[in-house]
Structure formats: C-alpha cells, structure tokens
Image (cartoon, coloured by chain):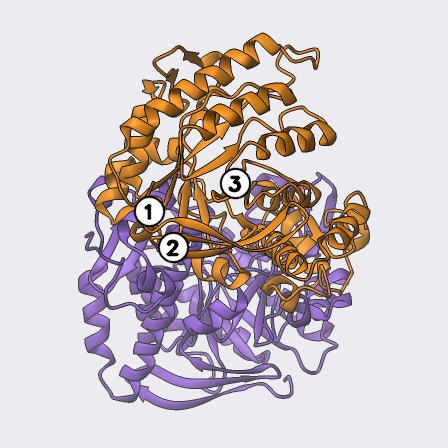
Chain colours: A purple, B orange
Amino acid sequence: MATGFGIEILARDGLARRGRLSTPHGAADTPTFMPVATFGAVRGISAAELAEAGAQILLSNTYHLHERPGEETVAALGGLHGFTGWSGPWLTDSGGFQVTSLADRARIDEDGVTFASPLDGARRTLTPESAIRIQEALGSDIAMVLDECIPIAADGAGRTDTRAMERAMQRTLRWAERSQKARQSRSQAVFAIVQGGASEQLRHQSAEATAQLDFDGYAHGGLGLGESREERRAAVATANGSLPEDRPRYLMGLGRPIDLLDGVSAGIDLFDCVVPTRNGRHGLVFTSEGTLSLRNARFARDDRPIDPACRCPACRHHSRGYLRHLIKTGEALGSRFTALHNLTYYLNLLRRARNAIESGCFQALHREIEEISERRL
Amino acid sequence: MATGFGIEILARDGLARRGRLSTPHGAADTPTFMPVATFGAVRGISAAELAEAGAQILLSNTYHLHERPGEETVAALGGLHGFTGWSGPWLTDSGGFQVTSLADRARIDEDGVTFASPLDGARRTLTPESAIRIQEALGSDIAMVLDECIPIAADGAGRTDTRAMERAMQRTLRWAERSQKARQSRSQAVFAIVQGGASEQLRHQSAEATAQLDFDGYAHGGLGLGESREERRAAVATANGSLPEDRPRYLMGLGRPIDLLDGVSAGIDLFDCVVPTRNGRHGLVFTSEGTLSLRNARFARDDRPIDPACRCPACRHHSRGYLRHLIKTGEALGSRFTALHNLTYYLNLLRRARNAIESGCFQALHREIEEISERRL
C-alpha cells in the first residue's frame, strides 16, 4: 500500500458512497469525475479554469506521454505536477487500453504488448513492469496496472467470444501480480483492473481474485465497449460485491451522465471520460433540461446562455447564437467554451450526487437524470 | 463626422504622437495595437484575457462575418459588442483586401467586386455602398471604406505595374467618395484608405485627394505586400505629411515589432496584424531579448518561462518545455497560451512606446527594438 493514500467513506445511501480520497498531492471529494488531459492538458482549458469548474483530480494517458515528450522529459520538468502546473492529484492510465485497441498493429503475448507506434512506425513494447516504471517516472498519484482489454462485441457480429474474454481476464490477473512486484515508489498508489466483458461470472471471478492481490484501489475496465446498460450495471454491481469496502473504485472511460449515476448507485467513486470535451467540440452540450446541439440552425439567433442554471464562463458571458457561430466557423474559443461548459456540468452533477448521498436522496437525483438523459432540446 | 468620435494628441516626440482615441464604446490609448478577431473571436482567447493583456480595441473582418453568420444575425444579437461580449471599441475592415486578394476568383470593375465565395461557390458582390451598409449592421465603432488593393510585387518579377497601381489608387478615391455618401449612421466613424503602392508620388497624390474628403480617420493600405522596409517608411511618411493632424492614422495589417515602431515614428496611431497570433500558433514567440522558436529541440527540458520579464498567464505558470510539448502535440492550450503571450508582447510594446513618447525618449526604444528584431534566441 502507498503511504499518504486512502479513501474515507463519509456517508452512504444504498450502495452509493460519498467519501474523501487522500493522495500525496491533496484530496478529492468522491464520487468525482476526472477530466481527461491526454497530453497533460485538457483541450484548450487551463488548470485554473479546471479548478474553478470544480475539478479535484485529473487523468493523463501514459502511452501518449511516453511517446511525446517521453517520461524522462516529464520527470526532468518536475513530474506531471511540475510539468503541467496542475499541482493537485493525478491518475495515469497504463496505456493498455490505447495499445491493445491498436488492434492489427499490436501483438499481445504473455510478456506484454508489442506494437508499431502510430507516430513514427517504430516498434515499441509495453509490459506490466515497464508500464509501472513509466508511471513512476511521470510521478502520478495513482498508477494503473497494464491490462488486456477486449471489446465486448469483438467478433464483429456483436457476440462475445467468452473464451477469449476469459483468457484476457486471466492474463490481466497475472499481469497485475507482476505489476505489484514491479513497484518501487512508496508514494504512488496502484489500482488493479477487473475484466471479464459482459459476463457476470467472469466479472465475479476477476474481482475475487484481483482483490486478493491487495491493491490500493480497483477499477472496472473494458466496459462501454458494446454491452447494454443493464449488462454494464450487472457487471459493475457483481464485481463491487467482491471488492473491499475500504478501497476506492474507479469505472474507466464512462460515459454519459446517466452512466455516471448508474455507477454511483453501485458504489463507484471515480470516473473519467472524453465525452464532455469531445461532445463540446462538436457543439453537443449538456444542460439541466437535456442536451442540445448548437449546430442546429434554430440556435443561430438565440440570445440565451446554453443553460441559464449554469455559472461557467460560457454561460455567464455568451449566447447560444455566438457559441454556435464559433463552433460552426471552427474558432478555437468555441470548443474551449463548450468543453469547459460540459466539464462544469459533469463536475456539478457529481457534486449534486455527493450532496444527495449525504441527505439520503440519491435515488431522486438518479431518476431526474434518467428522465432527461435522452431529451434533446 | 461621426459624433462621439475623435483623437486627442497628448504628447509628441518627433513625428511620433501619443494620444487618446474616443469612440461611443470607450477610449483607447494610442499608439495601440488591435488584436485580430476575424470571426469575432481571437484564436481561443477570451475577451477578459484580451482586456487583461491590455487590449483596448479589437478588429474584425467584415467579409468573414458577412459570410458567417451574416450581418443580420450579428445585428439581431446586439451588434459586434453584444454578439461577442467585447463591449469596448471595434474596428471592422471593409472586406476589400480579402476579396481583391481572391485574385482569379474576383472580378473588379467600377461598380465594385464580384467574386465566387470560397465557402459555397455562390456569386457575391461587394460595392462601396454595400460595404458601408454591412458594417453599419455589424455596429462597429470604426468602419473602413472599400478599397482596391494591388500587391506591390504584382507582376511576378517583383516589379510594380505603376499604371495599374495608379488606376487602383484613383478608383479607391472614387469609391471613398461613394462610401462617404452612403453613410447613414451618425455614431460610426469611417476611415478612408490611402493607396499607391511603393510610389512616394502616388502616396502623396492619394493622401492629398483623400484628405479633401473629410473622413473621421485615414489608413495606409496595400503595404507589407512586397516593398522594402525603407520604401514602406517613405510611403507612410510622405502620405502622413498630407493627412490632417487632428485625425487618427492607421497602418493596416502590419507587422513585426520593428514595423510597428517604424510606424509610430512616422506618426501612426493604430495597428493590426495576425503575426502575433499566427506566429504563436507555430511556436514562434517574442521576448524582450529576441524571438525564439519553441519547436526547437533545445527547449524540450527548459524550465524557464518564455520571457522572465513577461507577466502573461503563460509566463506566470508554464515552462518553455511544457509549452513546446503542447505546440508539438497540437494541444489547443499551447496555441492559446503562445498567442496570448505574443499579444501581450505587442500590447506591452505599444504601452512602452506611449510612455517613451511622453518622456521624449522614443528613439531609444526604437533603436532597442531594431537591435533585437533579427535576434533568434
């Protein structure tokens, strides 16, 4: 276990939990959302703006930083905290998801993953040991183990290859053991990853075995890749039943607002997703009454803010008509504002979830978001 | 003359003048630099950041706004001030430069310019009258007359076609008369444009005749298009000798820091240029000791700010190494920060010019910038 790291559960409402995650670089109120800073920056948004929007912990991508500028450069400039200027907690993924999703460019064997870099075509390898080593050099507060991640609808017909899924799950488990042994830093927490596709049985098996390895926290990987909402909820709930109560739980890469609240209701503490920034870039914005697409012509002369209930800089200062114009003309200020608005929405949604858990009315919030989740304004 | 508009000259040092430009939407200290907000926004930078950097007046492009979102939409959302959220003074160009530089796509005759829109191929026309009408709908504080603009090295051999240049200059003069008659707004100032290529004789002739038309201000057009620095200085100085002292003078579209100070030394009050934002996007940044290219490998682990003497957000919070990484990986935050840094440099340079004029030591500043203008760090 890493020193200076842990989660304290402050309140519960059903399985939902409201807690406080401590790291060597500060704390985060959970459940929380981690904005994605792939290369150490979030899509045109400054660290000060992220903090103002309510972000308390950021996520960066090991694989991308390994390629550019390289972990030695990040380390030379003070690790992720010094390099980027975000001095709060950082989580880094292991690169497994990016690398194994390179599909035909990647060869996976027991040792690790060998692949041709999309950047320069050079042959690179990533092993459980090197993934830990790179993340230690990056200096993140939370590192992730290398995992093998198979899309649930991998066979092209939308069916799951259960055999392949079980093999990947077992290999992820062996890689987790190797990761645990490879750790040298005492201050960096490491999370292991539960796999098993949409199979409740495999998820249960994976969670049981992974929990035995005594990691600082646990993540659910390989979801949001083809399974239904119900399958996902069942997979997470089943696995959570086998994970220790006193460790943080992280649902990787998901998703829409309703996916986050589904996760919270099953006891998830941490989330990340590119949906708010990517949707923002395309003019798709979240509001308290549903989503709206700013590219729609009827917003051209709309002088209202995206969401009158929102206090982000875009909503305080600009109309839908102006933001639509910026998105349509590809002006960088447009996607900066819409991405910041969406991040504010996500961070605020999880703040509301924390408050709702404290006051025992999380279900009401969950239903409210379910009702507007498919509504297009 | 427009009401609520004028320039007061507060100090002089040689031909250089330090003044205060009044408009219906506030004042600007001159000489000053106008950041270019082509579509009503400056390359990922917010209005609040521009104000903090010292901007007092912005420039927007009539032709671009006419195409998208259209002047009626801008008018419906409160004109440029309400639409963009920049409530200070706005200057709009006439679209003449953009349209006549479409070259083979444009046909110019006495009535105006007919061209195929690069956006959708549709046939559009711009006349002196419609350029004024569009700018009145946009609601800028300063409008520009439509002019015919011929590159100085137009014949492909670097020589000037003096006959064509004289014809364009004479037509620009007739168009200025028509623009003057087309004005309906009492609160919008209109500037006429001196043309004449690199010929001192034509510049003198153009300035003499244009000054007779009694505009709110005067601009030097068609420069920075192939002439030498000395030719440009002579052209501006000659024309300024024929322009009234009590009207603002604007050098259009120029340029490097030394070009601005050359202009100031000849009595120019207003400047605009895309150099700071465009160079910033490419990682070329200005400092108090010369320019540097952040793409250069030797900045990869440089933990110093771009310019220790600068107080912009990039220099306060980030290292050359981090900014280089953002530029190299195409992260939007990189060009946002470098563009804001360069704009801060330009705005600060003109603030220094104003102070130097007030204290009678403008020449020393001019020499200082001349010395570092070719220096690459």
In the rendered image, the vertical position of residue A357 relative to residue A173, given as above or below: below
Residue positioned 59% across, 65% down in the render: B313
The amino acid sitting under disc 1 is Leu
Split into 4 quadrants, where in the image is the N terminus of chain A? bottom right
The numbered mark, 2 or 3, whose residue comes first in the sequence reads: 2
- Disc 1, disc 2: CB below 8 Å? yes
Chain ID of residue with mark 2 = B
Residue at horizontal 51%, vertical 64%? Answer: B52
Left or right: B185 as drawn, with respect to B266: left
**N-term-proximal mark, 3 vs 1:** 1
Q: Secondary structure at mark 3?
A: strand
> Residue B192 sits in which quadrant?
top left
Q: Secondary structure at mark 2?
A: loop
Label for residue B249?
3
Circle 3 residues within 10 Å: few <14, some 14–19, many ≥20: many
Instruction: Answer yes or no: is residue A283 visible.
Output: yes
**Any mark on residue B80, and which?**
1
Whole-percent x and y of residue B203?
58, 24
Q: Position of residue B169 (x, y in %)?
A: 51, 18
Residue underneath mark 2: B86
Q: Is residue A102 left or right of residue A50?
A: right
Relative to A322, say whether A75 is above or below.
below
